[in-house]
Image: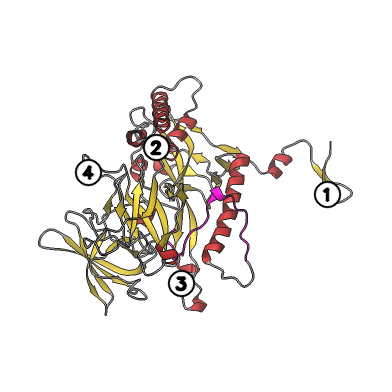
Amino acid sequence: MKGDFARVTFDPALHYSQVFQQQGRVLLEADWNEQASIQLDLLRTLARDLVGPCWAAGSGFVVTLQAHAGDWQLGAGHFYVDGILCVNESTCTLATQPHAPIPDAGLIDDPPASVALYLDVWERHLSSLEAPGVNDIALNGVDTASRSQVIWQARLLDTDAEHVGAPLDDTRAAIELRLQAAATDAEKAICKQQLADLDKLRDRLGGQRAGDDPCVLLGQVLGARESYAWPRMRAQLGPVEADSDPCVIAADARYRGCENQLYRVEVHQGGLAGSEDAPGGASFKWSRENGSVIFPVLGAASSQNADGSAQLTVTLGHLGRDQRLGLAVNDWVELIDDSYTLAQRALPLLQVGAIDATNRILTLAVPKNLAPYLPGADAHPLLRRWDQRNDLTEQGTVALAEGEAIDLEDGIQITFEPGGQYATGDYWLIPARVGGNGTLDWPQTAGTAAAMRSRGMHHRAVLGTTGDDGAYHECCCRFDSLCALLKGNTRRLAPNRAGRPRREP
């Protein structure tokens, strides 16, 4: 959630049930947001515990096959994934679903012989630039509260024996990295057991045995990253280098920023972490403002330079409220719109080359041999600023290395735990506070920074599969409402003397 928040305090492991306001106290936006998160988590957990991790209400999301996979129809209605309500307002096809484009649209255009259809569900944060209707025109469009939107995307997975196990390769490699870094016999035993479990799953995918449920197996494939290789990171205050002068006392490790900040560390390019032997791999970007420094894009045009590189000229609606929330030459920015976000793209970032403050025009340098992304004028285009500056890759991001401290700024260091399988959009939030002689609001375990899982994990559920015979087999459960079930019963409900319904024999 890339909003302008002081911090995000909800933690389901604390089992809080309510937030109480007290008289005469300051009310923070974090308290309000935590109360909403508590209620939302309760409702979703209740739906999952009562009915199951994935199920449809009535005829919601019923699949009707057509000659071409892109024309498969999804019925209107409701579907629940991990308790999250997904709503399809009207019958649509895979090609015209409301939250298109999807990351693997190529499979819809040219589907394999046997496929699984699944839902990819996640929550998208919407600023006032992406959802202009949230601002009240009576306030002259002043930015107020933002919104969270449930995004569901119907996607295809190739279930051919040679391809269906491919997503598990990175998961297995991540566990092997964690095994190499394991310090105790107990940790090594857990890693070895997980490797054995993955090998068994892959063997069953290659030659299903009697009694194997393909829906269950495919669900385990889609959930392997969450089960075995969920990325974890630590945030800590790094030591201050000692001065060579023996008379100067080294400063304590502390946050040295001048203001309270909410740092956001977000995975840009997914995959496995890189190393000296295998450079490349996953990368990340970071923001000291939780990625909330954004600018409305009024227009963008591309031009070619003599050396083969390109540059973008972007006209903005404004250049920010002040210098802290504005733009400067050499800043790294991301030019996005609705289609870019929904397709979960991760193109190289662009660097600000020049700023025409009078006309609000930016000149952005584009890496060589890269066709710049031009956002759609009707797709809520915006420019987002990121704050990394040193030791960057060609994409303007930071190479993601595990097991070693990486400096951000002002004394803040992060360390990615070995054995993570990273995906674009995974993120961590680090509240940095000036108070307390400069501290980080980060959980501690035995006096050291705890390894925290990333936020932003997607939820997935298999809708159904097709075989070589072309027949479609539904995987999800379906439930009618209690009223519909009772109407289908030979017994009916009639009011008793007190006016309450009673069951008649």
Residues at discs 1 and 4 in contact (Cβ within 8 Å)? no
Q: Position of residue 10 (x, y in %)?
A: 53, 55
- What is the number of the mark on residue 157? 2
Q: Is residue 33 visible?
A: yes
| 498 or 346, nearer to the observer | 346
Q: Residue furthest bottom?
A: 358
Judged by depth in the image, the label closer to the viewer, 1 or 4, is 4
Identity, as a three-letter code, of the amino acid under mark 3:
Asp
Query: Residue at coordinates 44% horizontally, 40% vertically from top-left?
Result: 226
User: Is the N terminus in the top left, top right, bottom left or bottom right quadrant?
Assistant: bottom left
16 within the magenta span: yes
Q: Return the x and y of residue 61 as percentages of the image width and height.
A: 52, 44
The quadrant holding residue 19 is: bottom right
C-alpha separation, residue under disc 3 versus residue under disc 2:
40 Å
Residue 417 at x, y percent in the picture? 36, 44
Residue 279 - label = 4
Region rendered in magenta: 1-21
Label 3, on which residue? Answer: 143
State the mark number for residue 147.
none
- Where disc 4 sits, the SS reads loop
Amino acid type at mark 1: Arg
Foreground mark, 2 or 4, reads: 4
Which badge, 3 or 4, comes first in the chain's sequence? 3
